[in-house]
Amino acid sequence: MKAKKKNFKPKLLALFCGIIVLLLIWLLLVKFEGETPSISLDPASSYIGKTHEISVSVSDIKSGVKKLWIGLIKEGKERVVFEKEFPRAGLLGAGKQHQATFNIQIDPRKLGLSDGKAMLRMVASDFSWRKWWHGNRTYIEKEVTIDTKPPEINMLSRVHNVSQGGSGLVTYRLSEPCQNDGVYVGSHYFPGHAGYFKDRSIAMAFFAVGYNQGAETDIFLQATDFSGNVSRSHIPHYFKKKGFKKDVVNIPDSFLKRKMVEFGDADTKYSEMPLIEKFLKVNRELRRINHGQIDKLVEQTDVDIYWEGAFSRLPNSARKSGFADDRKYKYKGKVVDQQVHLGIDLASIAHSPIPAANRGKIVFTGDLGIYGKTVMIDHGFGLFSTYSHLSSLTATQGQMVAKGDIIGHTGSTGLAGGDHLHFGILINRTFVNPIEWWDGTWIKNNIVNKINDIKSSN
């Protein structure tokens, strides 16, 4: 009996020691864990404007977030921007919250801080028992610039004559580098670009008035600096209203039988439809998709003026359709659709060679749905020309072409009824009337003279 008692004591001691070891391991791995909290800042901008919002995310997966503190320090002054303590789950438990995100408004003026360099400090701690129960701590400092003054816009060009469906150019000087700046025509934005002139504070923006925008449309410059401060300046201008032709396009069954087969193979959803329904799908849905493709193609533009002088038109050609013609499509005497023609149709002999209208870089060659085989040229600063319904392509993407270089041949691909060239001009995402760009006098008075005025004063 005594022997059994003697054997029991070591086992009890071993059990007790095992519990102590497990407890120590638990304390070490759980309560004394050493992983620091994580802090992320969005946006990660180094500028703070007059009214500035930041999104701060804090997380601690193991023991939970205990405290988050954010402050601004400038010239020895410390101002608390945000402070929050998080609850614990029970006396010995971890924190209840392991991650959180806060949208925090910073108003330097209310904090009594002037413009200039400052330090944004963020501190987060967790519920670990390390550092005498103060927990693990993440400490981040970020140098920022407080800037509560909006940029100044000094408009340099004085005369702005714009037509409905036409183009324009504005030159201006900014008091500071900006995150973005450019022209708004209503809700349509046309980015400005610096770097063309020796004085890098001078920028210029090509802009356009849509065919469907009237005299009441506000046209103004807007600049947003890196602190988010915004300035606006109205662009004084003379607006010329334009009338656009109304046209009726009859759709015979012979056209549908000949053309719709081209779209059946390209998209199976059109294959089994009645021909007129297939036409309407193509004319509406595929047209919208194609315009979306064009919008993406013109997102990037070279900050250079490749072109010089008037743009050329297809030699020995007759105009068949005009810009912004309001087309009503009739089938068996009934109007079934309506679209606006955003280019000029030019017809010559079949498969006529097509010269580039002016110098530029080829940014697209290929099939573009309703427009068929198409070439697009970037002429710089958001000015593009398009050549559609081609029978063949002789240009390649990325190629620089001179004015007059042959880029393809006329044809009837896409939704074309006969052999011709559909020629278009875009400013950024807005189609404009090509007639202006065929007119050397208009280009000189409205574009070139404004650029030369800046060059002569620099």
Image: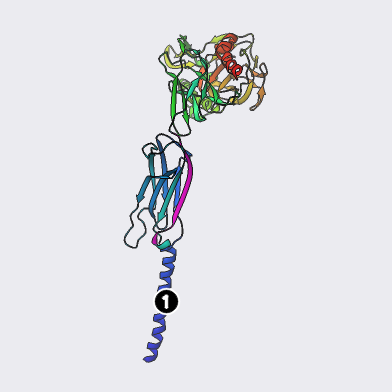
Going 43% across and 48% down the picture, which residue do you hit? 122
User: In terms of depth relative to the viewer, which is nearer, 284 or 244?
Assistant: 244
According to the image, label 1 marks what residue? 17
- Which of the 4 image quadrants contains residue 308? top right
Q: Position of residue 88 (x, y in %)?
A: 33, 57
Q: Position of residue 428 (x, y in %)?
A: 52, 23
Whether the magenta-drawn stretch holds residue 143 is answered as yes
Mark 1 residue type: Cys
Q: How is the image coloured?
A: rainbow
- Which of the 4 image quadrants contains residue 361? top right
**For numbered disc 1, what is the local secondary structure?**
helix
Q: Position of residue 442 (x, y in %)?
A: 56, 10
What secondary structure is the stretch in magenta mostly built from?
A: strand
User: In terms of depth relative to the viewer, which is nearer, 248 or 38?
Assistant: 38
Considering every residue shown, the one lying at the far bottom of the view is 2
Q: Which residues are magenta?
A: 133-147
